[in-house]
Every structure is written in structure tokens, then in C-alpha cells.
Image (spheres, grey):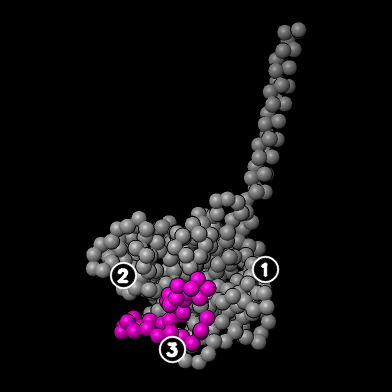
Amino acid sequence: MNLRSRPLRLALVLTAVLLLAGGSLGYVLHARHRERPPGPAAADASFSLEEPGLYFQDPVTGRVARQAGEQVPRVPGGPSCDRFHTAGEHALCLRRLPGVPARTEALVLDRRLREVRRVTVPGIPNRARVSASGQVLSWTTFTTGDSYATTAFSTRTAILDLRTGYLVKSIEQIPLTLDGARHHDSDVNYWGVTFARDDNRFYATVSTGGRTHLVEGDLRTWSAKALRENVECPSLSPDDTRIAFKKKVSDDPRSPWRLHVLDLATMREHPVSEPHSVDDQAAWLDSATLGYALPGRDGRASDVWSVPADGTGAPRLVVAGGSSPANVP
């Protein structure tokens, strides 16, 4: 071999290797980009939270829609979500990601539905709540099982404070006072957070020892105390005085709950006029009206209904084909 040609041959070989490696790296990066789940959504450019109306998840399209009145056609085009809630300056969109084990993507969006933050957590989307200001958010996922009607389930509930950027991935370790004493147990589960207007106090359900309790939490002191037994999925009224919740009234798995309202000042409760079992975290559509999802008619996955919070009146169908209602005044 000509010794003077050896450097040239070596340079050609090195160039080929680099080109091949660059092509492989480009393919890997392209493949990773292609496999990444789509962003929040593909919300249409014309769809935002600036318009008043009832926002909800359309179970047919899987996207958020808006309806300005019961006789007004829905406006489609929102983000793709399994659970949705909005208040103040932000919205929370929970989406189940493909693959095993189950994972959920929690997307924080602004009023123009632009992404503010994205968090991936284990489990199946279950509950979503945004405080009245839009600055504090919470979500719950099922990490084992998929129904509160059985004992074979486990949840994970997170709280995100956008004012500080601080994320509590699971609130299970919050110091809990139960029956006047500090409570520690490996079976503690929290779900269904709802926030007071001060963005500090919150309420949630805790399950332990086979019982469920309403707890009042404090973000600043990072503490929680049980207030009352047999309260699930609380929802605080706009004036912070009442809590709508589902109460277990039967061991029949087909109809275990009844929707109630609790007065926090007197601790007196009353059922609302909805006779069906409501497995939902009700939303306050205004200071006097609750909105919630029930299994749909005519093969629909779910419908949104409303009922007076004071126990009078009768339930009304608000949205045929919908869930996760949130009213934007």
C-alpha cells in the first residue's frame, strides 16, 4: 500500500463513519419526536376561555367544548382532555397517555389555552380542580383500580401552586389530625381537592381504616384535620360557606351515593333533589346551582345535569353528551 495514501483513506473512513452516525442520530431524534404524545391539544386557534358559558368535555370527540345556553349549539374546538376544570386565569387538562403502566399528563393552560406547565404522573385521570383565582391547582389519579365503589383502589393527589411553582406530587404525607390525634397509616388515600378563595385553605376526602372523612387543609402550615365522616369529592361553594359532596347511602355498587350539601357553619347537611347515584365531584355553576355528570341516555357516555343546591326543585339536563362541567361567567 502506498504510505502516502494511508492518511487519505483514513480520512475517508472517518468521514463515512461520522456521516453514518449523524444519520443514525437524526433518525433516533426524529423517532423520539414522532413518538412523543401530541401537545395539549390542538385546540383550535379561535377557541379560548375568554367567552362566557359552560365548558365541558365532549365524550364523543374527547375535546373540550363550550355551550352558552341550554338551547344553544355547542362550540367545539377545545383541547383534548379526559378531565377538565377552569377558573380564574388558568385551566387544568388531564390526559391519559398511551402505554403501560398507566400515566396521566396534567396540562396547565392559560385562558388562550396556551401551555403553562406540563407534569406527568402515574395513574388514570380522575379529578381536576382549579382555585377561583386560577393560581392553585389539584388533580387526582387512580393508581390502582378505577372505581370508588370498591375497596381495591388507590389514588394519588397532587397540588401545584403557580405563585411559587411548587408542586406537591402526593399529599399523602401531610400531617393529619383524626379524632383529635395525629394519624399515621399506610392505607391513607386523598382525593377530590377543592380550594377556598384565599388560595390557602382547601378541603378533600381522606380514606383510612375503611372510612372516609372530609378534611380541611392549610397550605401555609401544611396540615390537615378531619371534620366529618362519610364525605366524598367535596366542592366548595363560591362564597366558601357550603360544600357539595357525595355521601355513601348504600352498599349496592349500582347506586351507592347520593348528592348532598353541607353547611360549614352549622355542620348540617341535606340531600339535593337528584335521586340518582352521582359518582362525580359536583361543580358550582353559580352560588345556587350544582352541575354534575351522570351516565348518558341513548348510549351516550355521560350527560351534564344541574340541580338546585338547597334541596328544592328538580334536576335538569344541561348538556346531552358531556362531563367535567365548569362555568365561566
Kindly identify which residue carries mark 3. Answer: 310
Q: Residue at x 50, y 92 (%)?
A: 313
Q: Residue at x 30, y 63 (%)?
A: 176
Answer few, some or many: residues within 10 Å of disc 3's Cα (few below 14, many 20 plus, some between 14 and 19): some
Distance Cα–Cα, label 3 vs label 1: 34 Å
What amino acid type is highlighted by mark number 1?
Thr
Percent of width and height locating residue 179: 26, 69
The chief SS type of the magenta part is: loop
Q: Tell which of 147 and 192 is nearer to you.
A: 147
Residue identified by numbered label 1: 61
- Specify start and end residues of the magenta stretch as a single range: 247-276
Q: Residue at x 54, y 84 (%)?
A: 306
**Mark 3 and mark 2: span between their CA atoms?**
24 Å
Side (left or right) of 171 relative to 24: left
Question: The residue tagged with tag 3: helix, strand or loop?
Answer: loop
Displayed quadrant of residue 62: bottom right
- Pinpoint residue 142: horizontal percent, then vertical percent: 49, 60
